[in-house]
Amino acid sequence: MTTKIKILGVLFLLLKGQLTYGQKSEEKLVKKSFDNYKSAILNDKGEEAVKYVDSRTIKYYSDILELVKTADSAKVETLSILDKLMVFSIRHRTSKNDILSFDGKSLLVYAINSGMVGKNSVANNSIGEVIIESEFAKGQFLANGQKAPFYFHFYKEEGQWKIDLTSLFPVSTMAFKKMADESGENQNDYLFSLLEKITGKKPGTEIWQPIN
């Protein structure tokens, strides 16, 4: 009986070691996915970057593209400040022919290559502690090596860890709203001023119109 207990104890330790090793290996893969995405963004490689984003992110860009094409001014006014900025940016900075040729994935590629997805969104950022639960993982956001109180989310799709960019959109929305409030302008005027600074071109009334 004592021998059996010893054997079971050894097997338990071996299994525990394997699970720990597997967990550490998966954590490294999550961080590697973020690092690959970051490198692609910093080098304007949209086609490469989208390999590391998940289906939720692609769906978001598909939904934004649909809004760009079809949303009238009344619909646009109901959007969050971040979604509104996305719609305005694409309408202001992108040709009609390009918009009509895009799907969600190609829109994201275009947004990265044209600088709509800013390099400052990743330049000094990294992933700290990683927590994995089956096919889901979250990595703590580090800004200049300092812990921030939010996490990037990752999902394992087709055997590969991919980043869900939408997981930080609530934080981005709050940040844009705060900046708009502090500017003293209403949200729309703040967004128009922002676009003018970025592009050197003042947005016209057509920015409110669907693309068809």
Image (cartoon, rainbow, N blue to C red):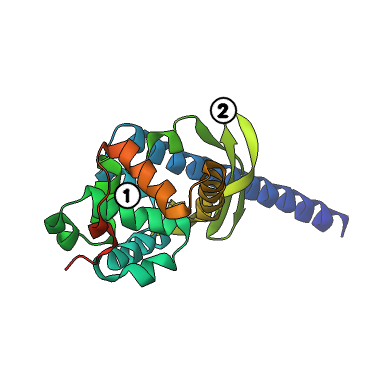
Quadrant in which the N terminus appears: bottom right
Nearer the observer, 189 or 70: 189
Dot 2: what SS? loop
Image position of 89 with respect to 32: above or below: below
Q: Is residue 49 left or right of residue 163?
A: left
- Mark 1 packing: few (<14 Cα in 10 Å), some, or many (20+)? many
Q: CA distance from mark 1 to mark 2?
A: 24 Å
Amino acid of disc 2: Asn
Question: For the residue marked with disc 1, what is the amino acid?
Answer: Val
Q: Which callout, 1 or 2, points at the residue further toward the start of the chain?
A: 1
- Where does residue 127 sit, x and y in percent of width and height? 55, 38
Question: Between residues 168 and 187, which one lies in front from this camera angle?
Answer: 187
Please state if 199 lies on the left or on the right of 86 as rendered. Answer: left
Label 2 Cα neighbours within 10 Å, binned few <14 / some 14-19 / many ≥20: few
**Residue 45 or residue 170, whichever sits in front:** 170
* Position above or below: 204 against 112: below
**Residue 164 visible within the image:** no
Residue 147 got which mark? none
Provide the residue designation for mark 2: 144
Which residue is labeled 1 in the image?
Answer: 50
Residue at coordinates 39% horizontally, 41% vertically from top-left? 37
Which image quadrant for residue 69? bottom left
Residue lying furthest left in this view?
Answer: 97
